Image (spheres, grey):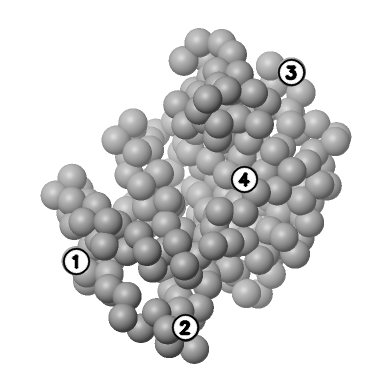
């Protein structure tokens, strides 16, 4: 898989400008009261306009490697992912439509707090929308830098699993379409303030490779 992903890394550098222009919503951030419309807008693949027709297209081998990675993640248990696989997921997710949700959990727990339930409900409604049907989503858990590395890694995995369990139980979403991964405190949203509560978040990424053209 390492060899295949070298092709993906090459394409990432070539597509930097096109990505920044065509997937602006991928950078969206929502707080505790994220709405269904906000989440839906952020996670839908953005159409490529004629003005971007000059943009380099993904190499077929790189796209095939990306597809194999996504397929290999379906039905995988969160804790079965290796550190290499977690990094590969992060690399592919970096150019996909995504949104950060500041979902709070009870202290030292994977229980979703009552204050964050509206955001989780909105997420379930958005992922149930026909416009997102057929996509595979990554649900990535992140923590702040308080506590040890092993502790935070475990906590981030349990919290990502809690979101998946809620979505499958309450909204009937296909569990195979929800890939959970934990990053602990390794990828803070604000690296200059690692203890900031903003780093405690759940990132949802639409891993679909289809892009509408107009």
Question: Who comes first in sequence, dot 1 or dot 4?
Answer: 1
Q: How many angstroms separate mark 3 from mark 1 (CA)?
A: 45 Å
Q: Which residue is mark 2?
A: 49
Q: Nearer the viewer, residue 105 or 7?
A: 7
Q: Which residue is mark 3?
A: 107
Observer-side mark, 2 or 3, equals: 2
**Residue 168 falls left or right of residue 91:** right
Question: Who comes first in sequence, dot 1 or dot 2?
Answer: 2
Residue at the image point whose x is 55% and y is 31% from the top: 190
Question: Who comes first in sequence, dot 3 or dot 4?
Answer: 4
Q: Residues within 10 Å of mark 3 (few under 14, many from 20)?
A: few
Q: Which residue is mark 1?
A: 61
Q: Residues within 10 Å of mark 1 (few under 14, many from 20)?
A: few
Q: State the image coordinates of residue 75 (x, y, percent, origin top left).
A: 45, 49
Q: Residues within 10 Å of mark 4 (few under 14, many from 20)?
A: many
Q: Which residue is mark 4?
A: 100
Q: Quadrant of residue 110?
A: top right
Can you say whether 113 is above or below 177 in the image?
above
**Residue 92 falls left or right of residue 123:** left
Q: State the image coordinates of residue 145 (x, y, percent, origin top left).
A: 55, 18
Q: State the image coordinates of residue 35 (x, y, percent, origin top left).
A: 78, 56
Residue at the image point whose x is 37% and y is 52% from the top: 92
Question: Who comes first in sequence, dot 2 or dot 3?
Answer: 2
**Residue 138 falls left or right of residue 59:** right
Can you say whether 156 is above or below 138 in the image?
above
Residue at the limit of the structure toward the top, as seen here? 148
Observer-side mark, 1 or 4, equals: 4
C-beta proximity under 8 Å, tags 1 and 2: no
């Amino acid at each position: 898989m390492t060899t295949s992903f070298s092709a993906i890394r090459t394409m990432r550098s070539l597509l930097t400008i096109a990505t920044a222009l065509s997937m602006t919503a991928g950078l969206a951030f929502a707080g505790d009261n994220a709405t269904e419309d906000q989440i839906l807008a952020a996670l839908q693949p953005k159409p490529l306009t004629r003005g971007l027709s000059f943009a380099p297209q993904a190499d077929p081998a790189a796209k095939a490697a990306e597809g194999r990675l996504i397929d290999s993640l379906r039905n995988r248990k969160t804790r079965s992912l290796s550190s290499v696989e977690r990094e590969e997921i992060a690399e592919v997710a970096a150019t996909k439509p995504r949104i950060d949700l500041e979902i709070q959990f009870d202290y030292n727990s994977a229980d979703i707090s009552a204050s964050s339930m509206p955001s989780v409900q909105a997420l379930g409604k958005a992922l149930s929308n026909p416009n997102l049907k057929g996509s595979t989503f990554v649900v990535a858990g992140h923590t702040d830098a308080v506590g040890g590395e092993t502790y935070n890694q475990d906590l981030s995995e349990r919290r990502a699993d809690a979101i998946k369990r809620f979505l499958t139980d309450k909204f009937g979403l296909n569990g195979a379409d929800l890939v959970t991964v934990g990053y602990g405190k390794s990828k803070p949203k604000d690296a200059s303030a690692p203890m900031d509560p903003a780093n405690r978040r759940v990132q949802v990424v639409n891993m679909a490779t289809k892009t509408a053209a107009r």
